[in-house]
Image: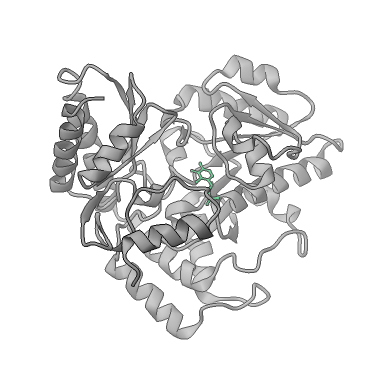
Amino acid sequence: MMDFEKIKEVSDKAFFPTYNRFPAAIVRGEGAYVYDSTGKCYLDFLSGIGVTGLGHAHPGIVEAICNQAKNLVHISNLYFMPPQTELAAELTALAGLERVFLCNSGAEANEAAIKLARKYSNITHEEGRTEIITLEGSFHGRTLATAAATGQAKVKSGFEPLPGGFRHVPPGDFETLAAAVSDKTCAIMLEPILGEGGVVVLPDAFLQKVRALCDERDILLIMDEIQVGMGRTGRPFAYQWTGITPDVMTLAKALGGGLPIGAMLAREKYAPILSAGSHGTTFGGNPVACSAGLVVLAHLRDEAFLANVLKMGDRIRAGLNNLKEQFPFIETIHGRGLMVGMTLATPCGDMVRRAFEKGLLINCTRESVLRMLPPLIISEKEVNEMLEILISVFEDGI
Ligand SMILES: *Cc1c(COP(=O)(O)O)cnc(C)c1O
């Protein structure tokens, strides 16, 4: 294997510079820990941005992947595949949404949702009822349409012209949203907790009003649960805290236990819209990814597993709240379950870098929000270890 300096040199030359990477090549992981090419150990409180929900090298995931790879790695969606069928049956049952389209990523799942909403409205209502309202600060992906849906300038800038028909309103402000709805609106798309937007939990009352408005006008409510879904909040899906059900839900990140897979789920009513030949994908619902996904779903049906998410989430928040007195630059602690945000009165990029040096992986969104997305299997010991490292980072100053 190349040594780290060589890896960095070759990478810096060969790749587009799309990522500001930390100076380490990660080669191995186990549970909540990963190891770099020099053997240094890191406590992973980011999980590949909410992907490895069961931690690294989870024995069940490894076994499912190996067994499926021995039988069949790929076949076209022109044929049935048992792991895909099982995943579809279990996912629709768990989500309370009858239909699913499987794809490879979050952006693709949101693309499918956007296409579904537009086609439904074009067929059912007057043509041209195609506008989709999303939230400022939201993140929905980096394809052209999902970048257009995203409420952050940095994702769109320079790539114009983007597909039209998206309109952004401030999160949590129902009056402004209701005023933006017109006879052109076909869907409202939102993350129940904005992830990249700074771990902003949308109030249940806001979501309930949005639901009622959508019902009244036959507008599709699309929930992007790509980051918050799959047990992250202590329930299988974050919408299950809110008292409402979306018409469409998108998933990806943690769905495949680390393998790339995405899903767009919707109510039975919308099934005929994506008719044969109207949408599809080569890799979507890959049997190896689906086999791993089945292991993840089995955990979401386990009460003790979900209880640990809530318990550890509470522990982290309590631990962080305890630091407020000692470190006055801490403003608020927010989030749900194991999706944790800590808003600081100062930019946090440098703190994240120092945490990395001390062996803790976390990240920073919106300049000044420290974000943690630990694996859902973390223990009290690992929470305590995180707090210790974080305190030492804070003690070194802002
Ligand atoms: C990560 C993310 C996406 C995009 O997923 P990709 O797999 O990177 O395309 C979309 N929406 C939300 C909320 C996300 O967190």
Tell me if 391 is positioned left or right of 199 in this view: left
Residue 298 can be seen, yes or no: no
Q: How is the image coloured?
A: one colour
- Tell me how many marks there are: 0
In terms of depth relative to the viewer, which is nearer, 287 or 155?
155
Residue 19 against residue 276 in the figure, above or below: above
Tell me if 243 is positioned left or right of 139 in this view: left
In terms of depth relative to the viewer, which is nearer, 276 or 53?
53
Q: Quadrant of residue 136?
A: top right
Residue 210, percent from left and from top: 58, 26
Q: Quadrant of residue 158?
A: top right
Residue 222 against residue 100 in the figure, above or below: above
Q: In which quadrant will I find the C terminus?
A: top left
In terms of depth relative to the viewer, which is nearer, 4 or 256?
4
Look at 48% across and 47% down and name the residue there. 19
Residue 307, percent from left and from top: 25, 45
Q: In which quadrant will I find the N terminus?
A: bottom left
Q: Quadrant of residue 297?
A: bottom left
Seen as rendered, the residue at the extreme right is: 127
Residue 98, percent from left and from top: 58, 54
Seen as rendered, the residue at the extreme bottom is: 71
In terms of depth relative to the viewer, which is nearer, 41 or 257?
41
Tell me if 380 is positioned left or right of 307 in this view: left
Residue 311, percent from left and from top: 22, 40
Residue 11 against residue 111 in the figure, above or below: below
Residue 325 can be seen, yes or no: yes
Look at 46% across and 59% down and name the residue there. 11
Look at 45% across and 36% down and name the residue there. 195
